[in-house]
Image: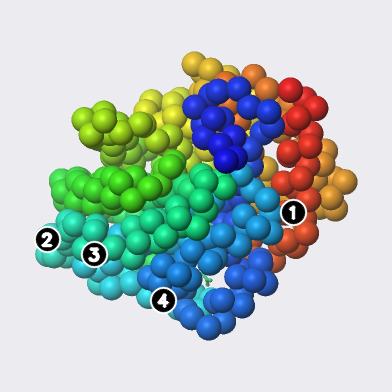
């Protein structure tokens, strides 16, 4: 089995730098588009056979060192009772938007094996089909990032309704966030029980905050989840699965992020990796940090950036190569294949 990814997460010695790509199963692959042409996105997410098929595509095509469950961070919103649709070229729509006491009270914290059983069935099927080839990463949105979609009713530019709830009705926000946090905690426990071998928590929109507000309104709930997951695994005598915390716009928040309790920190491309490592302190394990749009460079120019990131990551206890955010649909898959090859090749010579 290729367990290089898990070893790197634990800060153990590895023969090469493992690599996977955020959104590695997606529209830039014609194999994905072919499955997607027959089913809409949510239907795919709810069908374990289709989930397994598209999750495995990048393992075969790219030769990455980890699989990430094909799903979406908005699945738990539906499980809490909110309507969810993905409209073609418009992104997600959630209804009704959660903006007052009544809508917050209408949300339920349910058993994920009831309301999101298809996710756990997908994980169980994938572990069988992967047969140890590479580890399987499970994931969830962080409570704050998930909450922005629930409050705004979809994607947002300035997060007006979210910040208004935070500043005008902080007690309501807290009550709402405690429900979201409980849902995500139980969801991640169910994923680990079903066989997820690592967990990534996506806090894509964490960077819209000042550091003090990030701590109070976003990070606190992530700390609660990570503490709860670790205590629960100890109590159940389970081996601890590595927890990766990814925050978008990382650079202003590294001193906060390092108190999250995560085992691995995602780093975007807006900061040099060696600076991020210094500011995270305590010999961290890091993941990242190539600009996803750098994949539009010709491969010989991508190479320069790969070597630079590998060099700058050498001071970390562990490094998992990745993009600083998801691969975009217009990307040439050949460049992604070349990227994975380069990471494997150059990291062997550096170490
Ligand atoms: O990384 C992976 O390959 C695993 C699958 C995955 C998806 N979404 C599939 C997806 C993961 C981990 C996510 C996370 C996710 N979803 C995040 C956090 C990370 C990030 O990218 O910021 C967020 C904010 C979402 C919410 C979301 N999902 C939006 C805003 C959209 C619409 C925009 C878009 O890209 O179409 C989605 C849809 C979505 N999620 C697609 C995929 C492959 C595209 C669906 C399609 O085929 O049309």
Bin the neighbour count of mark 4 within 10 Å (Cα to Cα): few under 14, some 14-19, many 20 and up. few
Left or right, 265 with respect to 233, comes to: right
Name the residue nearer the viewer: 137 or 109. 137
Q: Residue at x 47, y 66 (%)?
A: 51
Res. 98 image quadrant: bottom left
Labels 4 and 2 touching (C-beta < 8 A):
no
Left or right, 324 with respect to 265, comes to: right
Residues under labels 4 and 2: Cα distance? 28 Å
Question: Does label 2 point to a residue whose CB lies under 8 Å from ligand 1?
Answer: no
Q: Give the residue pinned by disc 1.
A: 337
Q: Residue 279, image x and y in percent?
A: 54, 22
Residues under labels 2 and 1: Cα distance? 47 Å
Nearer the observer: mark 2 or 1; the answer is 1
Point out the tag, 4 or 2, that comes first from the N-terminus. 4
Q: Residue 271, image x and y in percent?
A: 63, 34
Point out the tag, 3 or 4, that comes first from the N-terminus. 4
| Mark linked to residue 105 | 2
Q: Residue at x 64, y 71 (%)?
A: 31
Secondary structure, mark 1, is helix
Q: Is residue 45 above or below residue 230?
A: below
Residues under labels 4 and 1: Cα distance? 28 Å
Q: Is residue 128 above or below residue 263?
A: below
Residues under labels 3 and 4: Cα distance? 15 Å
Secondary structure, mark 2, is helix
Q: Give the residue pinned by disc 3.
A: 115
How many badges with numbers are in the image?
Answer: 4
Bin the neighbour count of mark 1 within 10 Å (Cα to Cα): few under 14, some 14-19, many 20 and up. some
Residues under labels 3 and 2: Cα distance? 18 Å
Q: Give the residue pinned by disc 4.
A: 43
Residue 148 at least partly seen: no
Quadrant where the N terminus sits is: top right
Bin the neighbour count of mark 3 within 10 Å (Cα to Cα): few under 14, some 14-19, many 20 and up. some
């Amino acid at each position: 089995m290729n367990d290089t990814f898990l070893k790197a997460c634990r800060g153990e010695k590895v023969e090469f730098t493992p690599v996977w790509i955020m959104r590695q199963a997606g529209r830039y692959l014609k194999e994905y588009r072919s499955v997607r042409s027959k089913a809409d996105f949510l239907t795919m997410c709810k069908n374990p056979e289709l989930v397994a098929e598209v999750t495995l595509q990048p393992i075969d095509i790219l030769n990455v060192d980890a699989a990430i469950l094909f799903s979406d961070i908005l699945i738990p919103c539906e499980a809490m009772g909110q309507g969810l649709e993905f409209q073609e070229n418009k992104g997600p729509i959630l209804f009704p938007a959660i903006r007052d006491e009544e809508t917050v009270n209408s949300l339920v914290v349910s058993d994920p094996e009831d309301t999101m059983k298809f996710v756990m069935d997908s994980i169980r099927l994938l572990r069988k089909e992967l047969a140890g080839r590479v580890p399987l990463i499970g994931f969830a949105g962080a409570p704050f990032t998930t909450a922005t979609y629930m409050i705004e009713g979809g994607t947002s530019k300035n997060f007006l309704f979210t910040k208004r709830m935070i500043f005008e009705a902080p007690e309501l926000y807290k009550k709402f966030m405690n429900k979201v946090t409980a849902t995500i905690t139980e969801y991640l426990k169910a994923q680990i029980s079903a066989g997820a071998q690592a967990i990534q928590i996506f806090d894509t929109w964490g960077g819209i905050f000042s550091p003090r507000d990030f701590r109070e309104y976003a990070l606190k709930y992530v700390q609660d989840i990570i503490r709860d997951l670790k205590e629960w695994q100890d109590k159940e005598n389970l081996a601890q699965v590595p927890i990766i915390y990814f925050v978008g716009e990382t650079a202003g928040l590294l001193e906060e992020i390092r108190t999250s309790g995560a085992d691995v920190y995602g780093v975007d491309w807006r900061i040099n990796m060696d600076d991020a490592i210094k500011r995270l302190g305590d010999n961290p394990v890091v993941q990242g940090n190539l600009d996803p749009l750098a994949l539009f460079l010709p491969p010989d120019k991508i190479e320069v950036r790969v070597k630079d990131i590998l060099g700058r990551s050498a001071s970390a206890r562990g490094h998992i190569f990745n993009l600083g955010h998801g691969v975009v649909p217009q990307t040439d898959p050949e460049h992604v294949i070349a990227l994975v090859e380069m990471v494997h090749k150059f990291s062997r010579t550096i170490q």
